[in-house]
Amino acid sequence: MKDFAFTGGRPDPGTFPTEQLIEASAKALRQIGGDLVNYPGENGNQSLRELASKRFERREGVALPVDDISLTSGSMQSLELILRTFVKPGDTVLTEELVYSGTLGLLRYLEADIVGVPVDYVDGMDMTALEQQLEKLKTDGKTPKLIYVTVNHQNPTGAILTLERRKRLLELADQFDLLIIEDDCYGDIDFIPNATPDALYKLDRSDRVIYIATFSKILGAGVRQGYFVTSAHYRQQIHRGRWDAGTSGLASVIVAQFFNDHLDEHLAITNAVVKAKCQAVIDTLSANASDLCTWTTPRGGLFLWIDLPQRTDLDKLQKLAGRKSVGFSRGSAFHCRNEPIKSIRLAYAYCALDDIEEGITYLCHAIRDAQS
Ligand SMILES: Cc1ncc(COP(=O)(O)O)c(C=O)c1O
């Protein structure tokens, strides 16, 4: 049976650059050779850090300081290292109300008091609501430890925080002395030119933004290469809790070599394919469910968010969709208070383009049949 997997933020498997990575491996290994007998160290392989710096410069117009970059096993390890350093049980942490389930799981594990701020599906976190929340916390005698925000093609809503809101966030962070964790997991997966405004990290003048990025979403989650960027002050604190002796230098040199040779070309190819898949999902939803649901129009990233009618029985929907192996993620998994919201998230890059119409048509029928 076909597998219509609209779960998990994975890139398109069809454009995974196997042959180019084989070439990159041979080239990189010849260059690095016996150097791999050494531990990579807490910052990790220099060539991939230089590449990460250039990647940022390509989009933002300024390079990242290579010495301020630490490679990690995916961006999830960055998150784990950072949040474990700064969040202790009972600490207040602000996030978007709808937020990446992995971050939520980690914050819950750390016993953080998670305070969600409403997010609109287009423009991102609501800054008026954030200000009100910060004032309220202050009145209650609570000092939030940090704010976590995914500014570009947010998971799960696809929102892009506007430039105006980014500037306001930085002002509020100054006013309330907040550390900002900027998760740019979906940066560079753009369907339109200049899709995203300047990074918070670039706009920050007060050394209060820790920037996180990854190669998982533009190459593959299996390569486990991510990074965080911050000044020595925070980095030293974060590295004090790091015991893995560094991120695989072997994987780092291969990824660096591949992207040094192919970054623009690879992004052009993969973004075009992912955009076409996203459009196929939208076209099928429009043909079959426009009287039932509303959904976002992604400008990049890997996710489309669907608001279902309030009378939808989500257990029934999951059961019906499961019969044809149509997978989706329930909205509640991304809700900071785990509220049983009537929404679902579709990840559109993984399923084969030719299967999307069949899978989404079936999903639409299942949604219709799951109305009580
Ligand atoms: C917002 C966000 N941050 C971080 C991650 C972790 O990704 P990785 O560890 O593969 O880099 C994900 C994965 O889905 C994500 O959506």
Image (tube, grey):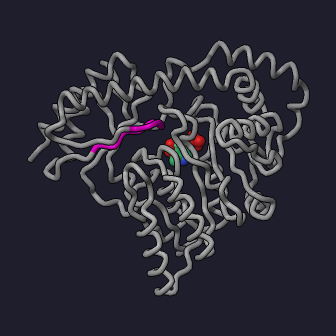
Front residue of this view, candidates 89 and 209: 209
Front residue of this view, candidates 2 and 283: 283
Front residue of this view, candidates 180 and 341: 180
Rendered location of residue 194, percent (x, y): 55, 38
Query: Among all residues in the image, which is located at the extreme left?
Result: 372
Residue 245 visible in the current orientation = no
Residue shown at the point (46%, 69%) measured from the top left:
130
Q: Is residue 20 left or right of residue 41?
A: left
Rendered location of residue 190, percent (x, y): 51, 34
Residue 312 visible in the current orientation = yes
Residue shown at the point (24%, 43%) measured from the top left:
294
Rendered location of residue 242, percent (x, y): 74, 55
Residue shown at the point (61%, 50%) measured from the top left:
199
Residue 295 colored in magenta in the image: no
- 202 up-or-down from 52: above or below: below
Residue 302 colored in magenta in the image: yes
Query: Among all residues in the image, which is located at the extreme right?
Result: 34
Residue shown at the point (29%, 43%) measured from the top left:
306
The magenta segment is 298-306
Count of numbered circles on the image: 0
Quadrant including the N terminus:
top left
Q: Is residue 339 left or right of residue 238?
A: left
Rendered location of residue 67, percent (x, y): 83, 48
The quadrant in which residue 74 appears is top right
The quadrant in which residue 247 appears is top right
Q: Is residue 184 left or right of residue 225?
A: left
Q: Quadrant location of ligand 1?
A: top right
- 185 up-or-down from 149: above or below: above
